[in-house]
Image (tube, helix red, strand yellow):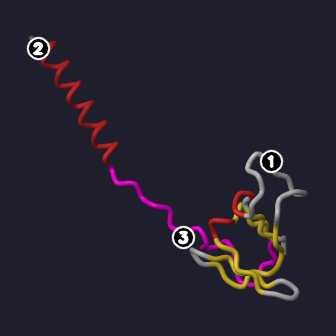
């Protein structure tokens, strides 16, 4: 009887632990925290855009040659926009459309 009781107690403890871990609230990513120490106004960057965000087929093989991009200096970055100053214009890029940001070395 003791073996059954300890086996049952172990099973209940494992089930409780699994339930507690699976119900633990997940924390959402904080875009503002990701920007700290990263991009600063005036940094020279190239912003590569997601192919599906600009109408390219999603079955292409991405490379530096065929990925749409915009180059310029960072004007500002928020949780919704990346704003670049190019030679002649100011460009507002929605954050969901950004594939990656390449920062030029200083």
Q: Residue lying furthest bottom in this view?
A: 88
Q: Which residue is mark 1?
A: 60
The stretch in magenta equals 24-45
**Main secondary structure type of the part rendered in magenta:** loop
Q: Percent x, y for residue 73?
A: 79, 81
Q: Residue at x 62, y 65 (%)?
A: 96
Q: Residue at x 86, y 88 (%)?
A: 88
Dot 1, how many residues are within 10 Å of its Cα: few (below 14), some (14-19), or many (20+)? few
| Quarter assignment of residue 4 | top left
In this view, the residue in front, 83 or 27, is: 83
Q: Earlier in the sequence, mark 1 or mark 2?
A: 2
Q: Earlier in the sequence, mark 3 or mark 2?
A: 2
Q: Secondary structure at mark 3?
A: helix
Give me the C-alpha separation between circle 1 and circle 2: 63 Å
Give me the C-alpha separation between circle 1 and circle 3: 32 Å
Q: Percent x, y for residue 15?
A: 25, 32
Q: Which residue is mark 3?
A: 33
In this view, the residue in front, 86 or 27, is: 86
Residue 31 is one of the magenta-drawn residues: yes
Q: In the displayed structure, does residue 65 sit left or right of residue 14?
A: right
Q: Which residue is mark 2?
A: 2
Numbered disc in front, either 3 or 2: 3
Q: Percent x, y for residue 22?
A: 34, 43
| Quarter assignment of residue 76 | bottom right
Numbered disc in front, either 1 or 2: 1
Give me the C-alpha separation between circle 3 and circle 2: 53 Å
């Amino acid at each position: 009887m003791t073996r059954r009781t300890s086996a049952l107690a172990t099973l209940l403890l494992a089930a409780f632990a699994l339930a507690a871990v699976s119900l633990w609230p997940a924390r959402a990513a904080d875009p503002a925290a990701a920007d700290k120490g990263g991009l600063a106004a005036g940094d020279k960057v190239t912003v590569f855009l997601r192919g599906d965000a600009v109408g390219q087929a999603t079955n292409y093989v991405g490379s530096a040659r065929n990925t749409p991009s915009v180059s310029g200096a960072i004007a500002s970055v928020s949780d919704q926009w990346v704003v670049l100053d190019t030679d002649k214009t100011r460009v507002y890029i929605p954050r969901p459309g950004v594939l990656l940001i390449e920062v030029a070395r200083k």
